[in-house]
Image: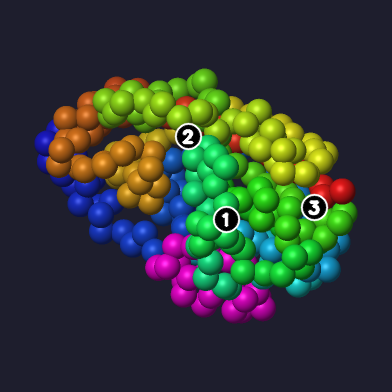
Amino acid sequence: MDSTVSSAIEEAFGVSIAGWDFSWLRGRAHEAPPSWNYGRLVRAAVGRSQFALDIDTGGGEFIERLAPSGFLVATEGYAPNVDVAANRLASVGIPVVQAASAPANVDQGDADPWASRAPLPFNDSAFDLVINRHSSYWPPEVFRVLRAGGRFLTQQRSEAGRDGEAWERLFGRTPHTHRRFDLEFAANQLVRNGLVLARAEEADTPMVFRDLAGVVFYLRLVPWSVDNFDPNKDREVLEHIQQQLATDGELRIRGSHMLIDCVKP
């Protein structure tokens, strides 16, 4: 088993994590889909909009695959991803602007985006559509840059899943004491900042891994899943996971997604 675990770690660390590309996990892991199709919703919404904004586009993979019609501009807060996204999206005519990402929504409290030097770099009422997939956002900034009647459409990973293991428990990490980022929290935060809910749904979407290299790669790409993940210090846990994979054929990690569609009155 020792050589199997070492080989899996070496394989996972030999893969680039530039951008926000999960395609290497194809065949190694899959995530149960929610009942809605966010890509289809976004494509339709952008097609009906005049000026649209994608907050924190990552490496631009999601938007590139959609190839939406209409004017769209994207922001990205993680510096190494900015050039990756700009190069990728240039082919579909979407400019990318580097802009600081918002802190986690549950950590924002009464913080001021401008005092935090993280406002969106756009004028008031600049867009009739703002989209955001799996990244934090400032609700007051979303409200500010939307026109009256404008729409905010977001899909988020939440902390309400019940099916599978929790990363924290599996790796022996202390559970976070902050309030959970779930549908109730996200919806209330948007409503408090002036937006009107049109749709709000949540779905269990566990992630199923088939091999250990996929687990290690995922934890490199999404480092906040396990605080201070280190394949050497966490070797015993990785050996346990490899044993489970050999016995059961899979590792199931709990997760959930939420969809929120709201409007600026």
C-alpha distance separating marks 3 and 2: 30 Å
C-alpha distance separating marks 1 and 3: 20 Å
Which tag, 2 or 1, sits closer to the chain's start? 1
Q: Which of marks 1 and 3 is in front?
A: 1
Secondary structure of the residue carrying tag 2 is strand
Q: Residue 151 carries which label?
A: 3
* Above or below, 164 relative to 109: above
Which tag, 1 or 3, sits closer to the chain's start? 1
Q: In this view, does 4 lie to the left or right of 249?
A: left
Q: Using a 10 Å C-alpha cutoff, classify the residue at mark 3 as few (fewer than 14 neighbours), some (14 to 19) or many (20 or more).
A: many
Residues shaded magenta: 74-95
Residue at the location (61% across, 51% down)? 138
Residue 5's image quarter? Answer: top left
Which tag, 3 or 2, sits closer to the chain's start? 3
List x then y, in percent, for residue 215: 34, 40
Q: In this view, does 85 lie to the left or right of 24?
A: right
The residue identified by callout 1 is 113
In depth, the one of 78 and 125 nearer the eye is 125
Q: Does the magenta stretch include residue 83?
A: yes
